Amino acid sequence: MTSRMENKSYLVQMNGNGVHNKSIENGKSLSGNGVNGKDLHHVSVRGALYPSKAKSRRQRWDVRPSEMANNTLNPIRAIVDGMKLTPNPEKPMIALSIGDPTVFGNLPTDGAVLQAMKDAIDSQKYNGYAPSVGYLKSRQAVANFYSRPEAPLEAEDVILTSGCSQAIDLAISVLCNPGDNILVPCPGFSLYKTLAVSMGIDVKLYNLLPEKSWEVDLLQMESLIDERTSCMIVTNPSNPCGSVFSKEHLQKIIKVASRHCLPILADEIYSDMVFPGCSCSSMASLSSDVPILSCGGLAKRWLVPGWRMGWILIHDRNDVFGSKIRQGLVKLSQRILGACSIIQGALDSILNNTPPSFYSKTISFLKTNSEICFNELSTVPGLNPVMPSGAMYLMVGIDMDRFPDFKNDVDFTERLVTEQSVFCLPASAFEYPNYFRIVVTVPEEMMVEACSRIREFCQRHNRAGSTESTDLDH
């Protein structure tokens, strides 16, 4: 019996109407009128599939990266990787370039946040797969935390993601097709362009105005909109500017979107990082008709960017998105099977048990450092800092005419590293040349030292008379 079975095989004949099996034994058909080898696959009884006819094959190895991979470029990496960064060995390095509040260890998260994570781990309830959009309880916790009477949220309006960057990725992916274009702030977070261009989506840059504390140039923004514009991205508070839009200015932006029936992707990851005396309204709370996907996460307010917990809040004004956009987000979330389950298990406790004093202490520190940096650099001839109102950043303009030793902001910041071991990010990385960005999360004494070194550097290279420069600046 065994040997008979081993000598027996089957042919599977393919036709347009289905599959027909023909049993073959000793080279003869046991049913039917014979075999046409042209349309056959030979299948052994053990289930292995073998073509009856040799197929064409490549003659040499030719494995290439996809178009999506080739089109993926982070402008920050493209610029920084090309810089010659050799610090002065006589001065310890001060990196003011990385938007990570944990780098120097002076801004730890709160003990309540850590305890929530420990409790989630110890419960052993969150070691398996969560739904791709997140646990219902965790989504409800986020909805409760951010719900407002003028912008209510339910659990079904929340999708949990692997960090705010994935939230942005999903939002762009669900709203845009290749050949569409999106409106992106300039200067703005480089990831928007990185994601869009890799998907075949064009990016149109709308200008922020430094002389107006980085408000949007509304006329220029509106002039960019055409029939293929599928989304407007608004970052508030801003990375890299640290600016916070007033309620009135946000309403004007929403009116532009309303006139052109454009949904808004609101990047509000820094919405809770606003200095005292300034308020930050969510875009959803101000919109009566424009649908908004608001992206946020734990990274900045809770000082845990490496935990990779973000979310999309769906504010569907007048049922514009309907069920299809929601279903699209669910489908896209299934590509990586959801955010980290352990952090989801801790989310309710993190949101509700972190003491307000933790937030106020963090914000107070950021404001103090920003004021130190602004006040120090405002008196440096040739530099024009713009005071922020939130987030973790400060932008500084460079009057390049006064620094003929340098070709551009990249050259300026590269030499600043070489001579003073201070690394600031050239704003060309944000497509905004002749500025540089400072991260204000470093320890206070380090901020003071960095500003002193920047002053020394500028005094050495400023080719205009210092008296003349001061008069022109102030």
Image (tube, grey):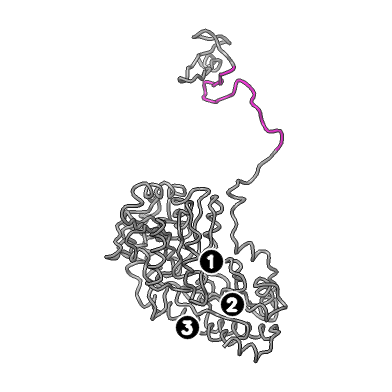
Which residue lies at the image location 43% right of the left edge and 66% below the top edge?
269
Quarter-of-image position of residue 78? bottom right
Q: Quadrant of the C terminus?
A: bottom right
Dot 2 lies on which element? strand
Residue found 58% across the figure and 49% down from its top:
68
Query: Residue flagged by tag 1: what amino acid is it?
Result: Cys
Residue 42 x, y percent position in the rendering: 56, 20
Residue type pointed to by label 2: Gly
Image spot of residue 163 (x, y percent): 46, 60
How many other residues sit within 10 Å of disc 1, few (<14), some (14-19) or many (≥20)? Answer: many
- Quarter of the image where one finds residue 359: bottom left
Pick the residue in front: 97 or 182.
182
The spot of residue 226 in percent (x, y) is 48, 54
Q: Which mark is drawn over residue 368? A: 3
The residue pinned by badge 1 equals: 186
- The magenta span reads 38-60
Q: Nearer the viewer, mark 3 or mark 2?
A: 2
